[in-house]
């Protein structure tokens, strides 16, 4: 496996602009270009602010393609690839990789709350399908699932492509726990 590019610093999460005919790709490209030119260290389309939960697969692909083209290799691109099903998340992750994403950000979204075994299987299935890094996204407010630091560290140790965490609970202690559990090896 190749070494993942360093993802650090300020990662910008662009909105997905809409116009009369749907996604306004010119405005999205302009927004992404402005962010990169302002000095961000990475772009992460299709998170919560990117309307990911409300886009069709074709709209989602339009955002991926537009963003990656606008970034033009200047900074890493971490694509939000989550879906209500593991199969959908795998399909989005595969597309993101093929389109040139640096990494994918995955939240364990499900109609039913997943247990730890099911969460691990979800991330393992995504990891088995792609070769780029996965950012495990812990945001219980939007997913209804809270991945505690021991589980996140276990996935980092056991699942090949889980390489980083976006910890969005607002609990600073969790970040300290992640650092201690991983001996500082797990970026968050």
Image (spheres, rainbow, N blue to C red):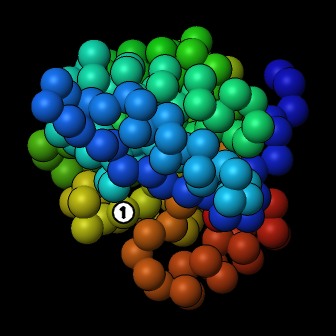
Residue 2 on image: x %, y %? 86, 24
Quadrant location of the C terminus in the rendered image: bottom right
Q: Residue at x 72, y 73 (%)?
A: 179
Image check: 73 left or right of 18? right
> Relative to 59, is 159 above or below?
below
Residue 51 on image: x %, y %? 27, 45
Q: Which image quarter: residue 59?
A: top left
Residue closest to the eye, 150 or 54: 54
Kind of element beneath mark 1: loop
Q: Residues within 10 Å of mark 1 (few under 14, many from 20)?
A: many
In the current view of this chain or complex, which residue is farthest to the right? 3
Q: Which residue is mark 1?
A: 139
Q: Residue at x 49, y 47 (%)?
A: 31
> Relative to 53, is 142 above or below?
below
Q: Which image quarter: residue 22?
A: top left
Is residue 1 something one can see in this rendering? yes
Image check: 73 left or right of 89? right
Quadrant location of the N terminus in the rendered image: top right
Is residue 155 something one can see in this rendering? no
Q: Residue at x 64, y 71 (%)?
A: 178
Residue 7 on image: x %, y %? 75, 50
Residue 148 on image: x %, y %? 46, 68
Q: Residue at x 60, y 53 (%)?
A: 35
> Relative to 112, is 144 above or below?
below
Q: How many marks?
A: 1
């Amino acid at each position: 496996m190749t070494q993942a590019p360093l993802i650090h610093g300020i990662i910008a999460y662009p909105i997905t602009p809409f116009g009369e005919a749907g996604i306004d790709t010119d405005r999205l490209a302009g927004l992404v270009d402005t962010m990169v030119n302002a000095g961000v260290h990475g772009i992460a389309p299709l998170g919560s602010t990117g309307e990911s939960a409300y886009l069709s697969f074709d709209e989602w692909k339009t955002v991926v393609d537009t963003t990656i083209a606008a970034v033009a290799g200047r900074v890493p691109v971490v694509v939000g690839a989550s879906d209500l099903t593991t199969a959908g998340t795998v399909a989005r992750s595969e597309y993101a990789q093929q389109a040139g994403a640096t990494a994918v950000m995955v939240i364990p979204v499900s109609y039913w709350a997943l247990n730890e075994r099911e969460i691990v299987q979800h991330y393992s299935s995504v990891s088995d399908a792609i070769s780029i890094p996965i950012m495990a996204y812990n945001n219980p407010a939007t997913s209804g699932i809270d991945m505690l630091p021991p589980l996140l560290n276990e996935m980092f140790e056991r699942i090949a492509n889980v390489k980083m965490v976006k910890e969005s609970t607002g609990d600073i202690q969790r970040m300290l726990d992640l650092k201690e559990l991983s001996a500082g090896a797990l970026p968050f």
